Image (spheres, rainbow, N blue to C red):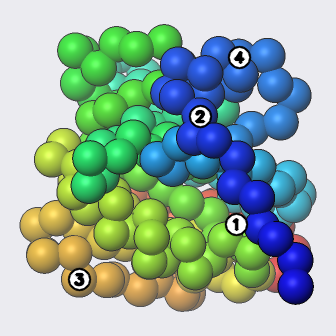
Amino acid sequence: MQAILKAPALSVEEYLAGELHSRDRHEYLGGTVYAMAGTSGEHNLISLNLAFGLRTHLRGKPCQVFMSDVKLRLRISEEDVFYYPDVMVACDPSDAERYFKRRPQVLIEVLSPETESIDRREKFLSYIQIETLSEYILVAQNKMEATVFRRSNKWEPEILNRADEVLRIESLNFALPLNLIYEGVKI
């Protein structure tokens, strides 16, 4: 029988200081850090296509678009949690921390086989607790499919899976056809 040793919980301050100097990114859940795996080319292209489309649309407006290197900080069941969403749109001017945001309006996760169950369950349940969140979007990387959850329809999913369908982010008055989200991606 092997003994499992649990490392002492890391404080938020220790975690944030460590992330500043780490070559690898880590998510933080109540004192425990989890290393994040690298992404595929498809994952990166989809994230970039979405972020570029959003950035172009939001230029000159108060919202900012962040990609996977800016953290999201949450407080869930008295625990601090930090995630790295693939794409995040923050519109609240008081949400001014340099390395993380607390009040995003839109969160997008690009699904991989390794992260899909976490993105669909754990992160979904955490994200919908954010008062400012209007939409949570999951985008598959191995097939053309986007699932949009909106606060306005009680977080019921809307699934898009045809190249001619348009992803609409209503809170930002933004629309992007699926064929442009998957531009350059071989599926």
Q: Which residue is mark 4?
A: 20
- Residue 13 lies, with reference to residue 138, above or below; the image says above
Q: Are marks 3 and 2 in contact (CB under 8 Å)?
A: no
> Residue 16: percent from the left, percent from the top?
59, 22
Residue that mark 3 sits on: 156
Q: Quadrant of the C terminus?
A: bottom right
Q: What residue does disc 2 label?
A: 10
Q: Residue at position x 71%, y 84% from top?
A: 143
Image spot of residue 179 (x, y percent): 64, 70
Q: Residues within 10 Å of mark 4 (few under 14, many from 20)?
A: few
Q: Amino acid at mark 4?
A: Leu
What is the CA distance from the residue labelled 3 to the residue labelled 4?
37 Å
- Distance (Cα) linking label 2 and label 4: 15 Å
Instruction: Give me the residue at 46% from left, 47% from top.
Output: 30
Q: Earlier in the sequence, mark 1 or mark 2?
A: 2
| Disc 1/disc 3 C-alpha distance (Å) | 24 Å
Residue 158 is drawn in which quadrant?
bottom left
Q: Amino acid at mark 3?
A: Glu
* Label located before the other in sequence (3 or 2): 2
Residue under circle 1?
Answer: 182
Examine the image and state in which quarter residue 41 appears: bottom right
Q: Amino acid at mark 1?
A: Tyr
Residues under labels 3 and 2: Cα distance? 36 Å
The reply to whether residue 152 is visible in this rendering is yes
